[in-house]
């Protein structure tokens, strides 16, 4: 389908500017350019495609989704021509896959690499997108495809800059190989990245590896293995069905959630049920009980099972106890898979510092001083300390909507969006896997495809109808934000500090950021919104029609003063919009 002939783009440089050339940006470019015939510019900070898989090239970086479902499903040729080599794809293989897709669809020619968006401003009806090379281009639509975990975070440890050894962050790993041989290495952080990089560094000829752990994690074995030709043939034979199942599932996996609870079962029965899943490895373990994330009794039994597995795996009982999580339920923080993580602590040259008992006091020129007065000397410190997740990259882009209001001002108390796809006050802005959409609670390529297709179809509808603007109403956005919070409150996710809760970065408002209601329910919702003529959106041909939410009468000056009197902290941009 092409809408080329029906719209006039004379007043803009591009129909759409897309930020990011990872899974989302590549597919978004293809849909808009190749299926709708639109002019699209993709801006990408890295020198190549890949997004998160370009940057996270630390030893051991591997996807926790199984490879045959961690990929696109929209193109049969790509699905049949690409063959994955292992059960879980390692970072270089995912990167190679995305390069293959970019070449296959001839995407690179519309991507400007090595360029960063420094601001995006909605001005006089179009988006003005400025980049760090000093250029500004205009577009009708502005689409962020920046991923959810793309701004690395390094805690502001006292005296950090005084440290004179090598430092690395897992999320911004160098392209040249890093040499660990005979070095004293520290790794700070035991999230999914730490749990992958620690065993790899521990395998090398390091002199000593010290792991600084704040919160122990429950890691389930991945049990990676090569995918032989027979397995691959079986997958190919059923690929369409497998993908359809993944796209209809609550978490984007072709898994059957067992319709059972552990709440009423004796621990021995729970162990019998969990053991085969443990042996099989991977995230099917998560769907053993349907109420894992809502029923504390079920979760406590699963957590208990996992605690015993850690105790069995680690030789030194004191180290084992430090590695056993006791302060949160399983999977309320993002549940990592592991390969040899616990075994690593059985090597004589690997030690564990629990920073809740013994916090980092400061960095020194030679290493890290902990509060017990010990100076730990290191040749290298690896920060596996995570990301300014979900909103960090969006906020860094300096996005300004109607009335000169910035996204940063708008989200001062946490993100509020409509469907995780758009923001009131920011016309023609689309956020692929934005906050308050399922994104990180699922197998990412699935919600990415749903979003990209929804956005593309929406743009096609607008252009065909000759409608210039689309923007969520304030009421719809408020309702969606409240719905998101209500759903989160029904789960166990909100019982622990995590990056899902925005809690990993000091001063970020505490709020649950992804949509916890499931990919399937969410996808039905966004399709229904479209079927109902974009319910919750204002479709407008002129700027004057925006911001009134269709039904709201304009406020008179006295009513506006009254509102301000009642709520002196009220945002003036909100008031101006109503007045
Ligand atoms: P993360 O989950 O945020 O983990 C960061 C780690 O650093 C946590 O253990 C955290 O402790 C610790 N930390 C943070 N600040 C600290 C401080 N001041 N002192 C001591 N420790 C501190 O980050 P990540 O491991 O990079 O993973 C982020 C997400 O990326 C994952 O959850 C996942 O979604 C994705 N990812 C996926 C894969 C995969 O598919 N295999 C691999 C890597 C990453 P607390 O827990 O106490 O905050």
Image: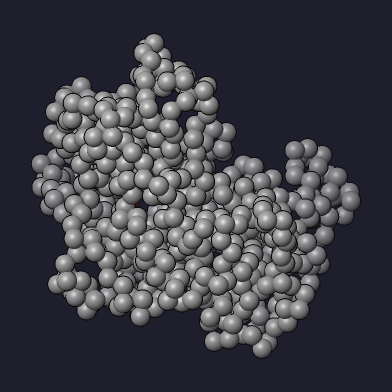
**Quadrant location of the C terminus in the rendered image:** bottom right
Q: Is residue 382 left or right of residue 274?
A: right
Residue 462, image x, y percentages: 65, 78
Residue 89, image x, y percentages: 29, 58
| Camera-side residue of 341 and 468 | 341
Q: In the picture shown, does residue 127 fall above or below 399?
A: below
Residue 277, image x, y percentages: 17, 52
* One can see residue 442 in this view: yes
Residue positioned 53% across, 80% down in the render: 34
Residue 76, image x, y percentages: 35, 80
Q: In the picture shown, does residue 89 fall above or below 574?
A: below
| Camera-side residue of 109 and 487 | 109
User: Seen from this angle, which residue lies furthest bottom?
Assistant: 5
**Quadrant location of the N terminus in the rendered image:** bottom right
* One can see residue 479 in this view: no
Residue positioned 52% across, 76% down in the render: 31
Q: Which quarter of the picture shows residue 43?
A: bottom right
Residue positioned 31% across, 72% down in the render: 82
User: Seen from this angle, which residue lies furthest top?
Assistant: 373
Q: Is residue 260 left or right of residue 183?
A: left
């Amino acid at each position: 389908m092409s809408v080329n002939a029906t719209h006039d783009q004379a007043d803009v440089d591009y129909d759409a500017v897309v930020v990011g050339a990872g899974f989302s940006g590549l597919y978004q470019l293809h849909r808009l350019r190749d299926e709708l015939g639109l002019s699209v510019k993709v801006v990408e900070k890295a020198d190549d495609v890949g997004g998160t898989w370009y940057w996270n090239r630390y030893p051991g970086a591997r996807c926790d989704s199984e490879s045959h479902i961690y990929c696109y499903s929209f193109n049969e040729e790509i699905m049949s021509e690409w063959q994955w080599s292992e059960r879980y794809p390692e970072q270089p293989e995912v990167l190679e896959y995305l390069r293959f897709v970019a070449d296959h669809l001839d995407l690179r020619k519309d991507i400007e690499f090595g360029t960063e968006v420094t601001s995006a401003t909605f001005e006089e009806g179009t988006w003005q997108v400025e980049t760090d090379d000093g250029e500004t281009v205009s577009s009708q639509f502005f689409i962020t495809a920046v991923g959810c975990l793309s701004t690395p975070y390094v805690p502001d440890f006292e005296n950090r800059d005084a440290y004179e050894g090598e430092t690395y962050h897992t999320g911004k790993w160098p392209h040249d190989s890093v040499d660990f041989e005979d070095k004293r290495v520290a790794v700070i952080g035991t999230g999914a990245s730490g749990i992958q990089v620690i065993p790899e560094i521990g395998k090398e000829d390091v002199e000593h590896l010290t792991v600084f752990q704040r919160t122990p994690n429950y890691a389930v074995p991945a049990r990676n293995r090569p995918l032989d030709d027979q397995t691959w043939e079986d997958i190919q034979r059923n690929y369409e069905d497998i993908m359809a199942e993944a796209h209809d599932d609550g978490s984007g996996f072709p898994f059957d959630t067992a319709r059972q609870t552990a709440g009423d079962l004796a621990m021995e029965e729970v162990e019998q049920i969990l053991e085969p899943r443990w042996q099989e490895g991977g995230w099917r373990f998560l769907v053993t009980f349907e109420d894992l994330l809502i029923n504390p009794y079920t979760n406590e039994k699963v957590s208990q099972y996992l605690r015993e597995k850690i105790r069995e795996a680690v030789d030194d009982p004191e180290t084992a106890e430090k590695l056993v999580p006791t302060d949160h339920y399983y999977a309320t923080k993002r549940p990592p898979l592991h390969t040899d993580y616990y075994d690593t602590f059985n090597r004589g040259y690997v030690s564990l510092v629990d920073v809740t008992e013994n916090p980092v006091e400061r960095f020194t020129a030679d290493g890290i001083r902990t509060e017990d007065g010990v100076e730990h000397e290191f040749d290298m410190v690896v920060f596996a300390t995570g990301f300014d997740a979900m909103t960090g990259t969006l906020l860094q882009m300096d996005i300004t909507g109607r009335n000169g209001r910035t996204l940063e001002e708008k989200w001062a108390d946490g993100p509020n969006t409509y469907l995780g796809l758009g923001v009131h006050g920011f016309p023609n802005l689309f956020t692929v896997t934005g906050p308050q959409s399922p994104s990180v609670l699922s197998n990412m390529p699935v919600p990415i495809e749903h979003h990209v297709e929804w956005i593309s179809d929406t743009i096609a509808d607008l252009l065909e109808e000759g409608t210039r603007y689309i923007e969520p109403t304030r009421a719809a956005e408020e309702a969606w934000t409240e719905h998101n919070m209500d759903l989160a409150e029904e789960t166990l996710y909100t019982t622990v500090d995590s990056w899902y809760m925005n809690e990993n970065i000091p001063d970020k408002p505490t709020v649950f950021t992804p949509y916890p209601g499931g990919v399937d329910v969410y996808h039905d919702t966004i399709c229904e919104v479209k079927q109902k003529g974009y319910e919750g959106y204002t479709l407008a041909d002129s700027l004057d029609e925006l911001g009134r939410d269709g039904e709201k009468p304009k406020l008179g000056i006295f009513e506006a003063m009254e509102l301000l009197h009642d709520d002196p902290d009220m945002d003036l941009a909100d008031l101006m919009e109503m007045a």
